[in-house]
């Protein structure tokens, strides 16, 4: 396709679904990561220039695994090894992951598929807390939607948990006591076997957390990040795109090129025609 | 265009030009904003779970106007007023700009035009320090490239200054003594008169800085952010796309939805066919 | 007293009681303030100099009202006015409190008195949750200990709540549901009427919090910081000094001179002879 | 000495010299450490409670080796070893130095001696840039002042460089081009041989920096922190105490107990009689 044809598509009108969460103080996040904080070191009126102009500025501090974010391959190791077989401790020496850091994640402009699992399971609001989404669930959803997954796709697995992100009590979305639905190692393997480029979910941990067990075991992270080279995207807002019945789209994700970091906050997009 | 056609374009192959700068400690930035810092609170091997898994995490602190970034309309006021005529001091009360903050910047999937001004001026490496890019320069570039600017476009003005971003001395790119090339109020007005959606440049301040004057007067910011409602994108990396001779593209920018903030770091993309 | 005599005292041996809390990630603090976080951007071995030397460094982010800390007079206003009668909004314009900021708190080398209220009340472990310490309680404690309060003293009011600081669940010390013991407006007035220089407690909020009411009303802060000019010190560790039966001491507190800030983390000392 | 006698001294009047520097955005510091930044996430008037009360809060981010600060023994290693002979890399695993971190620095209430070297050298304003203060210089100063150094003392070596801290150009105090005066390994050894508890200076690096060499070699740090167990205090303000002719005093330093950190910002005091 030529650029002209691509721009004609734009001119004809596209719909852009925003899959990112607002970053705001107090939002739910994993307590393992530095909390998101924001302040204005300068407000309007603080310093007014001779010409009447004034600027307001920000200061933020945060972990990179808060809000909607992507995991770099440097994020997780198993038995001391990263995805490329390198020594995980050595790779982080210097305080920067030169080889597998967030700056090495290429921007994604790819086919995206939403697997609306709760819709396929007949519980459209969401899977039950702590429910493990199985390969059969994934296959049934794929089939029901008629959205065959192809190599290189980005696949987003909706659990319905995302509807809890704005609950006044951050612990609800964290699912501390209840557990959180998601895939386990079998579901992750099913995705990796389809050669997907990245997999995402509408939960903090992407994968299923058993009630009360927290982040003590994360087998899907191991499968995807360490063994198979599939990026993980977390805390996505999939409610809007699911409600619109959109299951196939142009997926765009452009992570901040944070040199040597283990992840990046992102605001992914699902773009559809007309 | 249907989604299927859009995805066919993807399947046929697209080229994605990365217009963002790596975020790294020590990179050049305006000293008016909190410096970018990054550290790993946890490295691999620090905490190894029973199953052999280990995670590494980040902590970052920064201003939002460091690295490649976009200015929200809340960023600049003139004579005490923001773009929407609201009282700028009142708008920031509460420490968040609810109406014109960074979270209100819609993701951009639009036609983009690169105006390679130095190429048109016959000094392809870059404009001289402190050079003011005039409306005539912009028009000559537009004409030479045969890239008519249309309403809603995002226009990126290359000054060539971006080649200095990686200079070992951060002060060089800041242009403290030399001044920095860019448009002034007339150039900004020319852009706004074409109803562009956003305007960008490969410098920290977007607009021309006279030698030795620093950020004491910023008339182009006033024109675009306060008077005309055109977003400003700064510190872009335009060297690659210019070297490739790409002047027209699908422009994608998805700012972090930082609630109430005055801007956001971004990694914009220029997507072209084949 | 001459310096020589003072140093003879030191040579003869002094006991220094540490009244500060360790600053560590995850410690209890008010959720109204940026969380304490710490990371090592550089560890040993990351960069080894030719001579075999290596340095490790820190990065911290925090509010100033976390851990043991002192409130500057700029911290609280009432009906729009600060202690000096100035307009509170205007005083903070510029993002720094020039007149009443933390940098204006002179280091304290003063007589200190511990009022061990629970001991006087016959419940040495601590006052009940949400208990309001009355002027009568304070007077009874003063009398029982035979530690007459004098103008210029620093008075530390033990509630016993400090024993909960290290509870694995940070919410316990925060007292979200239970309330927290401490003085109310009458107790604060009693202290101010004795012309004390500063008043402290072993709780986050210094004053009594009613069960379930959080920080919605803080009358003792108003009395001390806005009306009477008495500094407030919070989250003190008074368990050790109380266990040692020390009620009178040389109190030393040297706040960080954070220019324009509303408070400072501190590590106060109670120094006693022999 | 009894506590009563100590408090009588206080009642009789003491003079407290502040040896700390104000912490403010833009102050000079080593670029190897995260810059100091401060903002007010909440100002007065942002949130006014029903009773008319309002609070203003801070957010700060910084390294621990900025402003006046103390180095923990964990800060420096040599040939892979810390002061206690432990493996430096292993000691920092977990991201916290449990054994030799800043939280292990006991508060200091000790005899302090100011060695006003420039006064003894006949150049009272300060030593020349890059000048190495020798053991002979230290001995001559000690003798001239008649302030015999005793075991356990804290010795502060004035170079006069501190008068540059408030220079509008932060690079001046950093001494990037000129070098900075201070002791070298011989001077550090001379101090350690007197069994001092801590040694301080009015420069960023404590020790002499040769012109243009920066922090590439730091032999005095090795001697004091790794070999001899003497704390180092940096960026002290010694101008006031020197101008007052005070060479002997009660030295008080109470570092923030930052768990696992490599240093702490401090505000040390020199207390003298009458």
Image (cartoon, coloured by chain):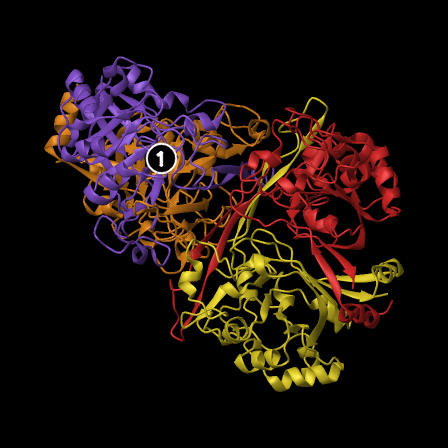
Chain colours: A orange, B purple, C yellow, D red
Q: Position of residue C144 (x, y in %)?
A: 74, 84
Q: Position of residue D232 (x, y in %)?
A: 73, 42
Q: Residue at x 21, y 22 (%)?
A: B137
**Towards the viewer: B244 or A214:** B244
Q: Chain of mark 1?
A: A
Asked which quadrant contains residue C143, the reply is bottom right
Question: Mark 1 = which residue?
Answer: A199
The N terminus of chain A sits in image quarter: top left
Left or right: C137 as drawn, with respect to A40: right
Q: Is residue C176 above or below residue A157?
A: below
Q: Is residue C179 above or below residue D120?
A: below
Left or right: A247 as drawn, with respect to D96: left
Q: Position of residue C224 (x, y in %)?
A: 55, 74
Asked which quadrant contains residue A230, the reply is top left
Q: Residue at x 38, y 74 (%)?
A: D50
Q: Is residue D221 visible?
A: yes
Q: Is residue C242 above or below residue A195?
A: below
Q: Is residue A1 visible?
A: no
């Amino acid at each position: 396709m030529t650029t002209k044809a691509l721009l004609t598509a734009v001119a004809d009108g596209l719909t852009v679904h925003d899959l990112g969460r607002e970053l705001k103080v107090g939002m739910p996040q994993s307590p393992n990561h530095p909390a998101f904080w924001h302040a204005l070191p300068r407000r309007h009126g603080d310093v007014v220039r001779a010409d009447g102009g004034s600027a307001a500025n920000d200061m933020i501090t945060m972990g990179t695994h808060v809000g909607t974010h992507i995991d770099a391959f440097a994020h997780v190791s198993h038995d001391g090894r990263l995805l490329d077989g390198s020594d995980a401790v050595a790779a982080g020496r210097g305080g920067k992951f030169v080889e597998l850091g967030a700056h090495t994640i290429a921007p994604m402009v790819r086919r995206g598929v939403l697997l609306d699992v709760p819709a396929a399971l007949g519980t459209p609001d969401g899977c039950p807390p702590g429910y493990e989404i199985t390969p059969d669930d994934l296959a049934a959803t794929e089939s029901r939607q008629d959205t065959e997954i192809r190599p290189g796709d980005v696949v987003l697995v909706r659990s319905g948990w995302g509807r809890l992100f704005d609950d006044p009590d951050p612990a609800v979305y964290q699912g501390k006591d209840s557990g959180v639905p998601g895939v386990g190692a079998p579901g992750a393997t099913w995705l990796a076997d389809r050669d997907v480029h990245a997999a995402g979910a509408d939960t903090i941990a992407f994968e299923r957390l058993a009630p009360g067990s927290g982040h003590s075991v994360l087998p899907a992270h191991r499968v995807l990040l360490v063994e198979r080279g599939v990026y993980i995207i977390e805390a996505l807002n999939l409610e809007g795109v699911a409600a619109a019945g959109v299951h196939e789209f142009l997926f765009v994700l452009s992570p901040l090129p944070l040199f040597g970091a283990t992840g990046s906050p992102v605001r992914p997009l699902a773009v559809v025609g007309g």
